[in-house]
Amino acid sequence: MRDRRTDDPAVLQEALAGFVRAFRLHQPETTPCGQQISVSEAHALGELAQEGELRQVELTRRLRLQKSTVSRLVTQLSARGWVERAPAPDDGRGVVLRLTPSGRRAAQNLAQARRDRFSRLLEAIPAHEREGVLHALDVMVEALDE
């Protein structure tokens, strides 16, 4: 590893840009696991698969996206036959989202691709470095949440 000035924001930007490219996050229509679905769609499917159903406003919060962006995202997932919308039972303006059977299969396929990709990635990180990598990621998330 080369010597880097740890107080230089350009060094952090360069490191993050390298990560984004290596993990293929700059390819918006393909997940880092190589699936032909946008990263946003993959995250939405994952959240819905985990919860069973979510209000659209809750999905917006979890994905950290704008309400209009999630509305378009849900429209795309519905067009693929993966998500169905239903009125919220206790709120006439609210919308509840659920995966269709096809959506559950797509979510399962994505989850398996994720497990495979992250297993390979974890194996590529030396065991003595793994805790540090996970800690660094936690620190980055906390810093971004501020």
Image (cartoon, rainbow, N blue to C red):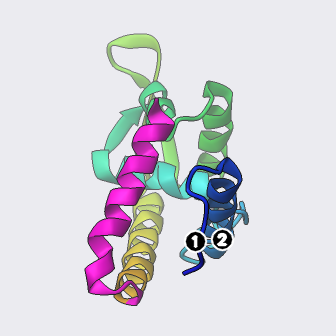
Nearer the observer, 103 or 112? 112
Instruction: Determine the image quadrant of residue 39.
Output: bottom right
Instruction: Determine the image quadrant of residue 75.
Output: top right
**Local crowd size for mark 1, using a 10 Å CA cut-off: few (<14), some (14–19), many (≥20):** many
Q: Which mark is residue 14?
A: none
In-image side of 126 versus 10 (left or right): left
Amino acid type assigned to the residue bearing label 1 in the image: Pro
Secondary structure at numbered mark 1: loop
Q: Which mark is residue 32?
A: 1
Residue 44 is one of the magenta-drawn residues? no
Asked if the residue under mark 1 is in contact with the one under mark 2, i.e. CB atoms within 8 Å, the reply is yes
Nearer the observer, 52 or 28? 28
Q: Which residues are magenta?
A: 124-146
Image: 143 above or below 117: above
Amino acid type assigned to the residue bearing label 2 in the image: Arg
In-image side of 28 versus 86 (left or right): right
Location of residue 94 in the rendering, given as x and y in whole percent from the top left corner: 46, 18
Q: Which residue is mark 2?
A: 24
Residue at image point 43% right, 45% down: 141
